[in-house]
Amino acid sequence: MPRMTQQEQTTFLSEPGILMRIAIVREDGSPLVTPIWFIYEDDAIWFTPREKSEWFACLRRDPRVALCIDEQSLPYRKVVIDAAAELIHDLGEDDQWRDRYRRIALRYVPPEGAEAYIQDTIDQARGLYKVVLEQARVRSWRMPLEGESGDGIWAQRYYAPGSKLHRD
């Protein structure tokens, strides 16, 4: 599949309503994947676990994450990120970054609903994490757009030697 250009990736990550799945490792080594809200700002992915969430406790112990941001309709854009998440604001510092949280909420619900959600959950402490894309392993791709060839769009490792689309 074609990789997204930097501009295509920026546009995709900035579109409202697209969920991110965060994968972390539990203490026993088992994986945990959680769909969450996020925002892309300052060439970083920002997200906010609540104090009592299992994945917040896991991130405190081990900051390694895999993030999957994708869409279900054509052109099936996908961004997958492997990184260490950085805790920017810990519990009790919510007032310092509430405007960013408001911008996150506005990506998913209309203004009145976003503000109501913030006010309804204002007493639930959160942390604020970020993943800087420049410091992460980032892979992106999409289906070919109109006018682009659809032949052999997958990585060559997927095509068995001797198959129609395998290149030597």
Image (tube, rainbow, N blue to C red):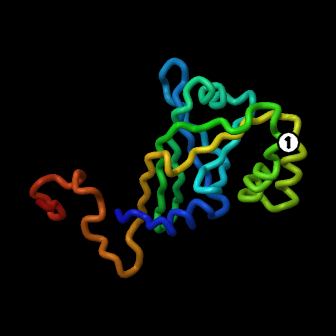
Residue at point 66%, 54% (across, down) = 39
Q: Nearer the viewer, residue 52 or 61?
A: 61
Residue at point 54%, 19% (across, down) = 27
Residue at point 52%, 59% (across, down) = 72
Q: Mark 1 highlights which residue?
A: 95
Picture layout, residue 73 above or below residue 145: above
Picture layout, residue 118 above or below residue 70: above
Q: Residues within 10 Å of mark 1 (few under 14, many from 20)?
A: few
Task: Give left or right: position of 78 versus 103.
Answer: left
**Quadrant in which the N terminus appears:** bottom left
Question: Where does residue 147 sit, x and y in percent of width and height?
Answer: 36, 81
Q: Amino acid at mark 1?
A: Asp
Task: Give left or right: position of 148 versus 10.
Answer: left
Q: Quadrant of residue 120?
A: top right
Question: Where does residue 163 sit, x and y in percent of width and height?
Answer: 14, 59
The kind of secondary structure element at disc 1 is: helix
Residue situated furthest top in the rendering: 28
Residue at point 62%, 62% (across, down) = 14
Task: Give left or right: position of 163 versus 123.
Answer: left
Question: Where does residue 62 sit, x and y in percent of width and height?
Answer: 55, 27
Q: Nearer the viewer, residue 106 or 98?
A: 98
